[in-house]
Image (cartoon, grey):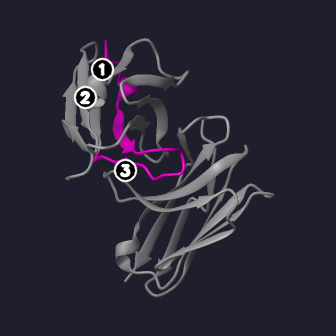
């Protein structure tokens, strides 16, 4: 098992374009999380899935953001009509079981909107 | 919104010295976790302490938790240059399901 994998590692896009990121969690993990992190800040929660169900979504997440986890395996995060303020590192994490377990993070996708 | 606040924001020490980082949080928690992040990389889990625990050790790491003061500390003993990284505390709040809420982090620099 190679851990949590995110693709692509870097993405540069023009303002107004749509982008999609993929996360492959550790195979037996039932929970999957998306976070956003800007320079010098801690990760900020976006959304989380338990299996294929999206159980929580941050109120900070605008309607331009959507996430899916079909079949409870990999997940995609799509940002529509990107804005310069969307530039950040997007981190995916997965965990197994109940709440008192550690989360395993991927290396992140760095998005730059120009 | 961020739950935790780390103190100090930045810490610079010499190799071999101990490093202490503090974290305060606002609401009741199920557990508190510490993560490490090297520049531009993902986060690596270091240690988890449950709300009914007061102290935990893992190798050169020692974590304390004071739920009455809503605070935690991370001590790294005999620091090495390879410990240079950002360190974040993260909490799972009683009311937030399994969402991890992170603080702003402490940037630790260990000089050789």
Q: Which mark is residue A78?
A: 1
B86 and A21: which is toward the camera: A21
Q: Is residue A113 left or right of residue A45?
A: left
Q: Secondary structure at mark 2?
A: strand
Q: Are marks 3 and 1 in contact (CB under 8 Å)?
A: no
**Residue at point 81%, 57% (across, down):** B68
Task: Report whether A15 appears left or right of A50.
Answer: left
Q: Secondary structure at mark 3?
A: strand
Asked if residue A25 lies left or right of residue A7, the reply is right
- Say which chain tag 1 marks: A
Q: CA distance from mark 3 to mark 1?
A: 21 Å
Q: Report x, y in % for residue A37.
A: 42, 40
**Which quarter of the rendering shows the N terminus of chain B?**
top right
Kindly indicate whether the residues beneath marks 3 and 1 are on one polypeptide chain.
Answer: yes
Q: CA distance from mark 3 to mark 2?
A: 18 Å
Q: Reading the chain from its start, which is encountered first: label 3 or label 2?
A: 2
In this view, the mark in front (3 or 1): 3
Q: Secondary structure at mark 1?
A: strand
- Callout 1 touching callout 2 (CB < 8 Å): yes
Out of B73 and A74, give the one closest to the viewer. A74
Instruction: Find the magenta span and give its range.
Output: A78-107
For label 2, count other residues whose C-alpha is less than 10 Å away and answer few (under 14), some (14-19) or many (20+).
many
* In magenta stretch: residue A81: yes
Q: List x then y, in percent, for residue A54.
A: 43, 23
Q: Which residue is mark 3?
A: A104
Residue identifier under label 2: A21
In the image, residue A17 lies at what x, y percent?
24, 14
């Amino acid at each position: 098992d190679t851990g949590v994998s995110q693709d692509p590692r870097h993405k540069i896009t023009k303002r107004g374009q749509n982008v999609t990121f993929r996360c492959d969690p550790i195979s037996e993990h039932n929970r999957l999380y998306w976070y956003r992190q800007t320079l010098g800040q801690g990760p900020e929660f976006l959304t989380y899935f338990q299996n294929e169900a999206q159980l929580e979504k941050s109120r900070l997440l605008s309607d331009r953001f959507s996430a899916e986890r079909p079949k409870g395996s990999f997940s995609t995060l799509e940002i529509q009509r990107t804005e310069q303020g969307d530039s950040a590192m997007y981190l995916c994490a997965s965990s197994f079981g109940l709440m008192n377990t550690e989360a395993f993070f991927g290396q992140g996708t760095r998005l730059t909107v120009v | 919104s961020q739950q935790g606040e780390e103190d100090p924001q930045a810490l610079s020490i010499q190799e071999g010295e101990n490093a202490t980082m503090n974290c305060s949080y606002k609401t009741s928690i199920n557990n508190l976790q510490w993560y490490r992040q090297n520049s531009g990389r993902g986060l690596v889990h270091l240690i988890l302490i449950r709300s009914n625990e007061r102290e935990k050790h893992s190798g050169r790491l020692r974590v304390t938790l004071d739920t009455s003061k809503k605070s935690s500390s991370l001590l790294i003993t005999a620091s090495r240059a390879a410990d240079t990284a950002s360190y974040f505390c993260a909490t799972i709040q009683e009311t937030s399901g399994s969402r991890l809420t992170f603080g702003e982090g402490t940037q630790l620099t260990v000089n050789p």
